[in-house]
Image (cartoon, helix red, strand yellow):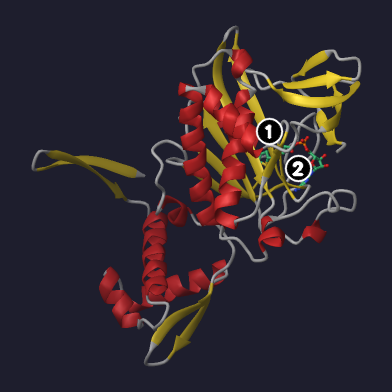
Amino acid sequence: MFRGCKKKNGSRVVFCILATNPIIWFTMYKDKILNLLRLSRSGFLSGEELAKKIGISRTMVWKHIKSLEFEGFVIEAVPSRGYQISSEPDILRKSDLVRGLKTKIIGRKIQLLSQVVSTNTLAMEMASKGMPEGMVVIAETQTGGKGRLNRKWISPKGNLYLSVILRPNIPIHKAPLITLMGAVAVASAIRTVCNVQAAIKWPNDIHLRGKKVSGLLTEMSAEQDRIRHIVLGIGINVNMEINVLQVGIREIATTLAVEAGHNIDRTIFLHQLFQGIEHWYQEFLSNAAGVLTEWERLNVTIGNRVMVSSLGEMLEGLAQGIDSEGRLIIKQEDGSMRHISAGDVTLKS
Ligand code: BT5
């Protein structure tokens, strides 16, 4: 579907791709029309102007306008003035994600789907087929979103569900730190974009005012002592109606929109999150201690009395810290210390 060609441009070699697929051309023109209309949000753009600027016929402009309306854009068409966008749907568009992306690795390759069983499952499959580090699988909804221990992650429209492929050259026992690194990136992005005090609850929850707004699920493929790949899965409740969640979960969950008091632009959020993941991942690879320090600054677990359900065992004590492998250190009533690698924490004070 693509033909590659190389042409000299002074000393620079420019690689150009000629798309021969009509669907790609259609999408490209549609994106161009959308951008032009967005830029002239204050005024109208006539079909003639659009046609001239892009180099297509007015009939094709009209077809692209209809296609945008089909996507959910509300476009006003006034005779002798032209078209104007009145409102945009809350959908993710690949062209918007690609534009404005400031990262070098994370999100440079994106697979955006309207629905998938689980972004983690798909990303694990893609990683095993050789997809590169930094590739992100994103879906508008998941039919089988996964939590830990076979639990479900409810995944209605309006939120974010994404999985990032990573190939860190680290010992296997350090892999759990990827979850902590991801949690730092998510909490930081929420704080920056939504201006609310997101906090990390060990090991994989992000909380706002004590309610869960995000969960992380890290999966790994390894052989002997080498990591093949890790998939960092992130679910964030963004703009959904909280009542979509079933009774029993909705009381302990919240969304960014509820906490910020307004809907959140998911594209802007993703750009910030990708930058955060890239920053903290690089930091982690060069000096994991820096990530742990930031994790401690953002967490709500350490210093509290906690109950931990871990691998069928119930533990109680004071959460004293995390060790260099990301395990939670608990001081029990009898003074003994336990390092816990997996579990569910309930804060008691
Ligand atoms: C997690 O598990 O919190 C990890 C969630 C990871 C989801 C992402 S979405 C993208 C990627 N693809 C996947 O398939 N998964 C990842 P855990 O700590 O086990 O928490 C699961 C529990 O959270 C459930 O048993 C519910 O109690 C609760 N829960 C489910 N859906 C929720 C939601 N949308 N918001 C808040 N809590 C929810």
For the residue with label 2, is its CB less than 8 Å from the closest atom of ligand 1? Answer: yes
Q: Position of residue 321 (x, y in %)?
A: 71, 24
Q: As rendered, which of 277 and 53 lies closer to the eye?
A: 277
What secondary structure is found at the residue carrying circle 1?
strand
**In the rendered structure, are the residues bearing label 2 and label 1 in contact, judged by CB atoms less than 8 Å apart?**
yes
- Packing grade of label 2 (10 A; few <14, some 14-19, many >=20) is some
Which dot marks residue 153? 2
For the residue with label 1, is its CB less than 8 Å from the closest atom of ligand 1? Answer: yes
Can residue 332 be seen? yes
Image side of residue 83 versus residue 344, left or right: left
- Packing grade of label 1 (10 A; few <14, some 14-19, many >=20) is many
Q: Amino acid at mark 2?
A: Trp
What secondary structure is found at the residue carrying circle 2?
loop
Q: Position of residue 302 (x, y in %)?
A: 74, 31
Which dot marks residue 196? none
Quadrant of res 5: top left
Which dot marks residue 217? 1
Q: As rendered, which of 282 and 121 lies closer to the eye?
A: 282
Picture mark count: 2
Q: Amino acid at mark 1?
A: Leu
Q: At 78% from the left edge and 27% from the top edge, which residue is drawn?
A: 319
Residue sticking out furthest to the bottom: 80
Image side of residue 38 versus residue 222, left or right: left
Image side of residue 256 versus residue 58, left or right: right
**Quadrant assignment for ligand 1:** top right
Can residue 167 be seen? no
